[in-house]
Image (tube, rainbow, N blue to C red):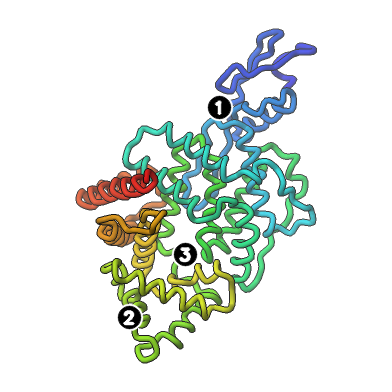
Amino acid sequence: MSFICKCIDRTLKHIGTGIIQCTKCNETLNILNRQDPLESSKLAHEYVCLTGDLNIPCEFPFVDVPGILPKKIKPTPISVLYNSIELLRAINAPFVDSKIAQNSNSEILQHFFTEYTKAMEKLSSANDGSPERQLVFRLISQLKSLTETNILDHYFKTLVPYVWSCHEQQCFLPEEPNIQTLPPAYQFLIELKRSVQIRSVYSKYCIPFDVVHIMVYCYACSHDEEIVANLAFDLLNRLCKGQFFNVNTPYVQEVQKIINNNVTFKQNTDLYYVVRSIRNGEACECLSTFLEKYAQLEKFVSTHFKSGDDFARGQAFPYTLFQTNSDYLGFVLALGHVATTMQKNNGKISKGLFATSRKLHRIIKTMVEKMNEFDTEYWTLDTFQMFLAQDDTFEKQVREMAELVLRDESSNEDE
């Protein structure tokens, strides 16, 4: 940063909003709002090398991610950019043809779950509390429930081997030589591009695999609510469009074989009717009597499932029994609401919970159908507001259901 001034033995300091000042001559340099989108991070990195101050903010581009509006991310501490590069490099590493061993013991890799949670809570507390924004952070908080507390350990030990086992031929990306000598924003874009390529091949097999990548994106953009909202609504859109539905895997084939060969009217009448209810989209119509039989079916499949572990079985069952994506999503979310809201100390079901879950199932089915009909390239916060506004009745149902679900789960946490 010799071009700030010509002072010898000068001391630099950050005086706020990305402005660096020489304390000897008071010359300043604004490292934000640079014409070159990569220059801000380069200047911030040089400042860190001179001072060790990781709180200096910088801007960087977030581009070439399908479904996400290209954007220059709002001023973000360069420490977040450094961490995001390291996180992306780590989760990409199993799919990169590299002979360089990756460091898996750094602070951010060990404590990503905590740092992600803190970043999202800080962003949530800064929003204006509108229903649409509440839904954004509800979706973001739910991402954590789709994986384990030790996210990256689960990713490397379970999710990566699982998606590999589903794909016939492994795809390895070439190593980028000397990448770590490039400006941080450039490194970020390279790793982001790799992540997108990896997801395009493997994410369809496993929602939690895709979610880990999305969580890293959200962390990187945690100072820019617009991108975080875009990421959340895009994932919701892809779920509704069936990107993860009707994907054939060896585990799906085994569950289908178990059901077809063993759960017939003559062999097992009770479980046969459970399967028929699921296939007919009737599973949530009488949850109070259905769940016990459903648990028996799940245990039956678990006993006969031999080709993979519990995680592989959980990815195939009950998924493979559903005829439509809307029925599947509605059932999973309704069942998840029951599991989340029941009293954990005694397993009791609170009054009205099954009715709420049935309503949730119906609204989710309606949302899936409506999102499939809504034509847009980018699901931003503004897009979602327009989506809701096209049908006053549906908008009211979504808002009421969101309040009801939040109330039920909040009441359970207080008990």
Name above or below for residue 174 compared with residue 247.
Answer: above
Q: Residue furthest top?
A: 25
Judge depth for marks 1 and 3 and give the one in front: 3
**Image quarter of residue 10:** top right
Q: Which residue is mark 3?
A: 244
Name above or below for residue 102 compared with residue 295.
Answer: above
**Image quarter of residue 298:** bottom left
Q: Residue furthest left?
A: 393
In the foreground, 293 or 122? 293
Q: Can residue 373 be seen in the rendering of this structure?
A: no
Q: Amino acid at mark 2?
A: Tyr
Q: Amino acid at mark 3?
A: Phe
Numbered badge on residue 147: none
Q: Which residue is mark 1?
A: 33
Q: Are marks 1 and 3 in contact (CB under 8 Å)?
A: no
- Residue 54 picture location, percent across and down: 66, 29
Quadrant that contains the N terminus: top right
